[in-house]
Amino acid sequence: MVPARPRPHGATATPPGSPANLQRVRDGSGLLAAAALRRLDEELPWYRSLPAEDRSWVGLVAQSGITAFVTWYADPAVPPHGVGEIFSAAPTDLTRSISLQHTLQLVRIVVEVVETHSDQLAVPGGERDLREAVLRYSREVAFSAAEVYARAAEVRGAWDARLEALVVDAIIRGDDDNSLRSRVSALGWSGRGSVLVMVGTTTSPLDEVRAAELRRATRRAAEDALVGIQGDRIVLVLGGEGDLEAAAVALLHRFGPGPVIIGPTMDNLDDAPRSAAAALAGLEAAPAWPGAPRPVLADELLPERVLIGDSEARRTLVRQAFAPLESATGAVLETLSAYLSTGRSLEAAARDLYVHPNTVRYRLRKVAELTGWDPLDARESYVLQVALAVGRLPAAH
């Protein structure tokens, strides 16, 4: 800062906002604006990296700030008002290009420029008054900037919440809409990696505070995340390149008591409706398996989903269990059928088939290899029994 010139002997302080001081400040406003723009370009890398259009808007905001200060300085006895107009010339989208921190840096540089030139601009004896006026006005500008960003964030947050709800609803409905990707991109969805859907319930509908907390937790757990709150039902869409099932498990405590279902992992967002359909069917069918783990994968509820008429579950059982067994050699399907129909007894199945029990045991191991479900496990043998039943129905072929 340029050192203040000593006040001549016998000189009196210039009254605040005096016509002489005011006129000199008005005459020097162009100098101040040019100096501010030079400082912005020299000291702020983020300003230099902005597109030309945004850079021009930032420069306009800086010039508006100086002009508004000169207007207010004409009558500093009146509390500053209308400082929000400084930002009104720039589009609202500018708040997406520069952050509040950047805006405050802009305010600081403008203040420093005016302070630096105060001794040059002020009449003798008016230097202190001008500096104090600058500091007072800069405080109001800073508050105004914070208010502008808070208002923009509130509007954007409300819009994002509505858009997020529409996107989650579209995924649940399975809408074949080409605009889905553009909508999720507007919400910050990167599109990298896989996708899965997780559903559960809460004891009561979430208020705004709990909903915001859930969104923050979900975004910390996964690279990409969408949150749908539908009454007492919560739908989470998780995406990214990490372990999405582990991320889903980490969010379990965000749900209320009751079943929490994790849909199958899909390759991309286009297939997310399939994961959502499986998860929602699992949520409906979960009461039929009281001993189900929590959370439980939707594909672990295939028999229960078949009972409620889920055609995808029926097709999955036929594809993953019945079809491999039907095409296998060595009487594998016949052996499994005999084992299940005799109350899961190796000896009884061996007698029905006229083979040794070790042969039955060997063939059942082949069943586990072919399907991924072990007939010797009580739960998994139930899955296989349902698979055999639906596979023998004419509708399965």
Image: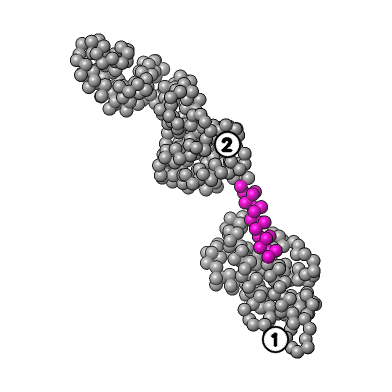
Q: CA distance from mark 2 to mark 1?
A: 67 Å
The answer to whether 96 is drawn above or below residue 371 in the figure is below
Residue 237 image point, x, y percent: 49, 39
Question: Which element is circle 1 on?
Answer: loop
The answer to if 166 sits in the magenta stretch is no
Q: Is residue 240 visible?
A: yes
**Front tag of 2 and 1:** 1
The answer to whether 237 is drawn above or below residue 47 in the figure is above
Query: On the picture, is 350 further left or further right than 216?
Result: left
Circle 2 is placed at which residue position? 229
Q: Is residue 183 visible?
A: no
Q: How is the image coloured?
A: one colour
**Three-letter code, disc 1:** Pro
* Magenta region, residue range: 139-157
Residue 359 image point, x, y percent: 20, 18
Circle 1 is placed at which residue position? 6
Residue 201 image point, x, y percent: 54, 32
Query: Which sits in the foreground, 370 or 129?
Result: 129
